[in-house]
Image (cartoon, rainbow, N blue to C red):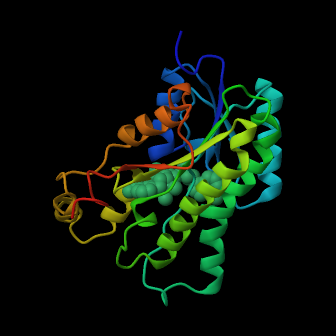
Amino acid sequence: MSALDGLVAIVTGGASGIGAAIAQRLRADGATIAILDRDTAAADPAFTAFTADVSDRASVDVAVAAVAERFGRIDIVVNNAGIGAQGDVAANDDDEWARVLSINVTGIARVTAAALPWLRKSPAAAVCNTASIASTTGLPQRALYSASKGAVSALTRAMAADHLREGIRVNAVNPGTADTPWVGRLLDSATDPAAERAALEARQPHGRLVDPDEVAAAVTYLVSPAAGSTTGTSIEVDGGMARLR
Ligand code: NAD
């Protein structure tokens, strides 16, 4: 018997990168996976995927209802979908601020709110949000992104407080720079991608990028019954970046 046998888990942004690794890990531990992503064509066809844009409440409501209809329950929600933003506080206009916050922060509220009636019925309800090293560390040229991920940490604690007595635990992971298609796209846009990658690796305290599977392992622990007394907290998966400089 595996830890998550019989449980149904929604993974937003599960078509790529960290979300895809989370989906694999949760499935290996016995969960049935429902990927929610705006780009379901990119998802591993081994998973059932539901198209939704987390910045659009109607599409979220339809997709979460479809997951419940298909599987009859929702026990775990992993709010992982997110996008980046570069530059200082002057670099992005109001529309971009609204767009990024709507995906990275309000998206978590939309998906979790839609799933709440199902989570309340689950004997093993857990939510895990993907925050970032940017939640706690002042990164240069990441003003909007950092604001959004700091909000994810605060929202994680608030949700944990609101739903503790309902038996729903809420935690977060704070990944450092992880080797995902997102980071690959950033490196590919450099003049010398190989040199840029080497420089990025050298900036990590442990000399390499974070493996998405390492983030997935932390998420899998946080949503499992083994973490039954853990709520409102975050696990850093960053090679020590936030603590050891
Ligand atoms: P990725 O771009 O490889 O994957 C992101 C996935 O989210 C994609 O499948 C994309 O289609 C989906 N998505 C994006 N916007 C969406 C929306 N509005 N609605 C539904 N789905 C949407 O990115 P990744 O590197 O795997 O990042 C995943 C999460 O991890 C993000 O929240 C990101 O902020 C966070 N994170 C990443 C890193 C890193 O270095 N890669 C570090 C810290 C935190």
Using the image as rendered, state which of residue 137 and residue 203 is in the foreground.
137
* Residue at 47 percent of width and 29 percent of height: 25
* Residue depicted at 36% across the width and 39% down the height: 214
Residue 243 in the image, given as x and y percentages of width and height: 28, 59
Residue 63 in sight in this render: no
- 17 lies left or right of 198: right
Residue extending farthest top: 1
Tally of marks: 0
Which residue sits at x=50%, y=56%? 131
- Vertical order, 128 against 72 (above or below): below
Residue at 18 percent of width and 51 percent of height: 206
| In the foreground, 43 or 1 | 1
Q: Position of residue 196 (x, y in %)?
A: 21, 65
Task: Give residue 162's position: percent from left, percent from top.
Answer: 72, 51
The image quarter in which residue 176 lies:
bottom left
Q: Is residue 57 above or below residue 121?
A: below
* The C terminus lies in quadrant: bottom left
Q: Can see residue 95?
A: yes
Is 103 drawn above or below residue 9 in the view shown? below
